[in-house]
């Protein structure tokens, strides 16, 4: 399970999605999330999933990566779907009734919609990190938040912290996996026993993990200090972000697709 977490991983490539301007890519990701919630009808969700699958194919990222990114949160999706099935009421006769448990067609529909929406949301945000390196993503966040600098908001520091946190997620996952394997080799029962026993068995894992995380943070701070890092003031970049003609064409194409998805509300006005 630990190895299946793909948050923060980057897959280098030269596809149109990789070359797309990271600022526009970040904005389009936010717009895609908004579209998922605005077009919650069957046709809208289907078009949203098709659009996302097409982006994965263009980016030449295996579709199995979607399954790996969804596997850690699959219990949450199933739990949310079960809650919607049993607690969302509807009109007409129930599909199933036993004691205080009643299932309506509206509850089943809403559970499916919620599950597909959450899965598409996670897969869409994962595509952003798959195709954008942490350094470029930091520059994009800083560029988009630059107007707040006039209000003395620490834009560069915020972007740097977000990028470092995102960058070290795979490192901490790998460190957790190593610690768990070491504890299992010493006889720790991490996967068996009662829930309370499993929680107690995690203590020997969490303590070394926190110590390792603090050590890495201290080493990173010392390395930045030795390189005379003083924040964003006076700092130059090796690659300056510039939008080209192809970026605007890709932006127009994505906006047209989002418009078609939102237009599906006209087909299903009651959703």
Image (cartoon, grey):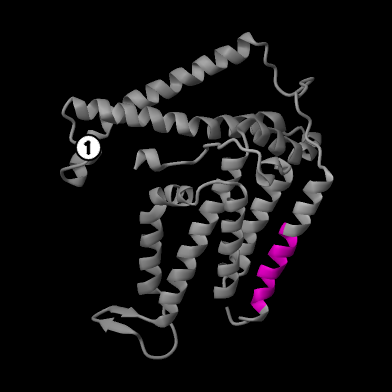
Q: Which span is picked out in magenta?
A: 254-265
Q: Hey, which quadrant is residue 23 in on the image?
A: top right
Q: Determine whether 183 is above or below 271 in the image.
A: above
- Local crowd at mark 1 within 10 Å, few (<14), some, or many (≥20)? some
The residue closer to the viewer here, 154 or 174, is 174
Q: Considering the image in quadrants, where does the C terminus appear?
A: bottom right
Q: Is residue 208 above or below residue 241?
A: above
Q: Is residue 258 magenta?
A: yes
Q: Would you say residue 245 sits in the magenta stretch?
A: no
Secondary structure at numbered mark 1? loop
Q: Residue at x 56, y 17 (%)?
A: 221
Could you tell me residue 224's position as x and y percent? 61, 15
Residue lying furthest top in this view? Answer: 226
User: Which of 158/14 is in front?
Assistant: 14
Q: Which residue is mark 1?
A: 190
Quarter of the rendering occupied by the N terminus: top left
- Main secondary structure of the magenta stretch: helix
């Amino acid at each position: 399970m630990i190895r299946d977490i793909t948050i923060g991983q980057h897959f280098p490539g030269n596809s149109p999605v990789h070359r797309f301007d990271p600022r526009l890519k970040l904005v389009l990701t936010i717009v895609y999330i908004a579209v998922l919630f605005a077009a919650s009808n069957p046709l809208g969700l289907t078009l949203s999933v098709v659009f996302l699958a097409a982006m994965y194919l263009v980016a030449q990222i295996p579709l199995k990566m979607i399954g790996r990114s969804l596997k850690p949160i699959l219990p949450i999706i199933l739990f949310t779907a079960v809650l919607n099935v049993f607690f969302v009421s509807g009109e007409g006769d129930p599909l199933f009734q036993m004691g205080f448990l009643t299932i309506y067609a509206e509850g089943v529909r809403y559970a499916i919609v919620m599950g597909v929406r959450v899965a598409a949301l996670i897969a869409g945000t994962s595509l952003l990190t798959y195709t954008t390196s942490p350094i470029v993503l930091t520059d994009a966040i800083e560029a988009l938040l630059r107007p707040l600098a006039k209000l003395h908001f620490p834009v560069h520091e915020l972007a740097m912290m977000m990028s470092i946190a995102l960058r070290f997620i795979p490192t901490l996952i790998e460190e957790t996996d190593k610690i768990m394997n070491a504890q299992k080799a010493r006889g720790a029962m991490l996967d068996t026993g009662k829930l309370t026993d499993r929680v107690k068995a995690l203590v020997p894992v969490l303590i070394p993990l926190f110590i390792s995380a603090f050590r890495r943070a201290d080493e990173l701070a010392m390395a930045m200090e030795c390189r005379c890092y003083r924040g964003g003031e006076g700092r130059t970049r090796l690659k300056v972000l510039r939008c080209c003609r192809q970026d605007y064409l890709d932006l127009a194409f994505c906006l047209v697709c989002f418009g078609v998805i939102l237009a599906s509300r006209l087909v299903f006005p009651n959703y």
